[in-house]
Image (cartoon, rainbow, N blue to C red):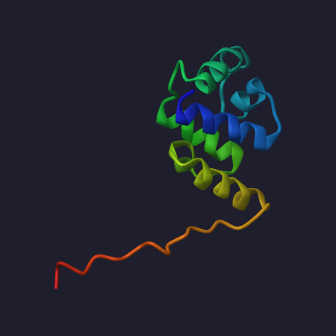
Amino acid sequence: MSVIGKRIKEARDCLGVSQMTYGELAGLTRRDANVYMNRYENGSVIPKYNLVLKLAEAAGLPEYFFYIQDDAVAESLLDAVSGRGSWTVDLSGFSPKPNECS
């Protein structure tokens, strides 16, 4: 399963709808939704960016959610958007680079 396929499934599960319903919410016809949403989720077809935008809007998520590689970060964002928690990022190991333009 591709990262984007995994995120599509997670967004759909968060909504609590079928593949076909999620596809229809994103503007696909019933026939296309039935065929393509399964292909998107299993990674055999990668959706075009304009469809990702529609999937994001239907789920109430930012479009970049579908491209997040780190599962913990994606889960944290889902929790924050759904009201199950707050989205925090651990910056304890972060050290900013000095400004090279000065």
Image position, residue 39 (x, y; %): 60, 19
Residue at image point 61% right, 22% down = 42
Q: Nearer the viewer, residue 33 or 85?
A: 85
Residue at image point 69% right, 43% down = 58
The tally of labels here is 0
Is 68 displayed left or right of 82 in the figure? left
In this rendering, is residue 64 above or below 80?
above
Quadrant (top left/top right/bottom left/bottom right) for the C terminus: bottom left
In this rendering, is residue 100 above or below 70?
below
The residue most toward the right is 16
The residue most toward the bottom is 102
Q: Quadrant of residue 77?
A: bottom right
In this rendering, is residue 25 above or below 35?
below
Image position, residue 67 (x, y; %): 50, 43
Image position, residue 23 (x, y; %): 69, 28
Q: Nearer the viewer, residue 26 or 46?
A: 46
Residue at image point 55% right, 38% down = 52
Residue at image point 57% right, 27% down = 1
Q: Quadrant of residue 16?
A: top right
The residue most toward the front is 93
Is 36 displayed left or right of 91 in the figure? right
